[in-house]
Amino acid sequence: MDQQPFNVDSISELHKLFFLAPPKNPLITVIDLKGNLSQEHIEAKRLLINFYSIWFKEDVSGVVRYGQRAFDFQTGTLTFQGPGQVISMHNHYFSAGWGVAFHSDLLLSHTTLRDTIKAYNFFSYDVYQGLHLSEEEDKKVRALVADIALECECNDPLSRTVLIAQLELLLARLYRVYIQQMNPARRDPTDLLRQGENVLDQHAHGKQ
């Protein structure tokens, strides 16, 4: 495995990494996972992802390492990654699904979501369990993701406002699922990467 992570800093770089057409919007994208992504060239490489992403995969197998752990796909196949986190994939396969990735620059003009996105702690390293979507939840979430995909193709002045509103609703729905399913007792308080996140957050807020 490479010692130095490969940085993926933008949505455009994410598309290039998986040999996809350029994104319609440089700050947010929806990726159709049907037919799988080309992944052989990044097998076991460490990827440093510098934006937010949400993934829902069907018929998952193999391993996705997330920091010091591997995602537990036995609990569900909805997973999250936050900026500055490292992942690697080993014999990873899925038959279908979707991904939503968005850069923090999308939120620059929206102070509420920009300042509160940390509250969505499913983007944290300490959440390594996949979440499960019920049939009804899956239907609602897929409809939202489809709407985001359509809005990504718009270039009018209100497009960013609409995208942020759609993203807020998606995150709120997924956070409700997270709260219902996450068992805090299963978190590992000794996780070094999570401790590092806490230290950085404290310094960012002027705490010692």
Image: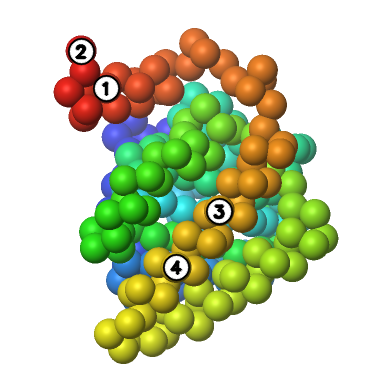
Task: Look at the numbered discs 1 and 4 and tell me whether their residues touch, using CB distance below 8 Å.
Answer: no
Please tell me which of labels 2 and 3 falls first in the chain.
3
Q: Amino acid at mark 4?
A: Ala
User: Rounded to the nearest whole Å, what is the CA distance between mark 4 and mark 2?
Assistant: 35 Å
Instruction: Look at 74% across and 47% down and name the residue there.
Output: 132
User: Rounded to the nearest whole Å, what is the CA distance between mark 2 and mark 3?
Assistant: 32 Å
Q: Mark 3, residues whose alpha carbon is within 10 Å: few (<14), some, or many (≥20)?
A: few
User: Rounded to the nearest whole Å, what is the CA distance between mark 2 and mark 1?
Assistant: 7 Å
> Does 63 appear above or below 162?
above
Please tell me which of labels 1 and 4 falls first in the chain.
4
Closer to us: 203 or 30: 203
Please, what secondary structure does the residue beneath circle 1 have? Answer: helix
Kindly identify which numbered label has been placed on residue 202: 1
Q: Position of residue 76 (x, y in %)?
A: 73, 44
Task: Look at the numbered discs 2 and 3 and tell me whether their residues touch, using CB distance below 8 Å.
Answer: no
Task: Look at the numbered discs 3 and 4 and tell me whether their residues touch, using CB distance below 8 Å.
Answer: no
Q: Amino acid at mark 2?
A: Gln
Kindly identify which numbered label has been placed on residue 172: 3
Q: Amino acid at mark 3?
A: Ala
Task: Look at the numbered discs 2 and 1 and tell me whether their residues touch, using CB distance below 8 Å.
Answer: yes
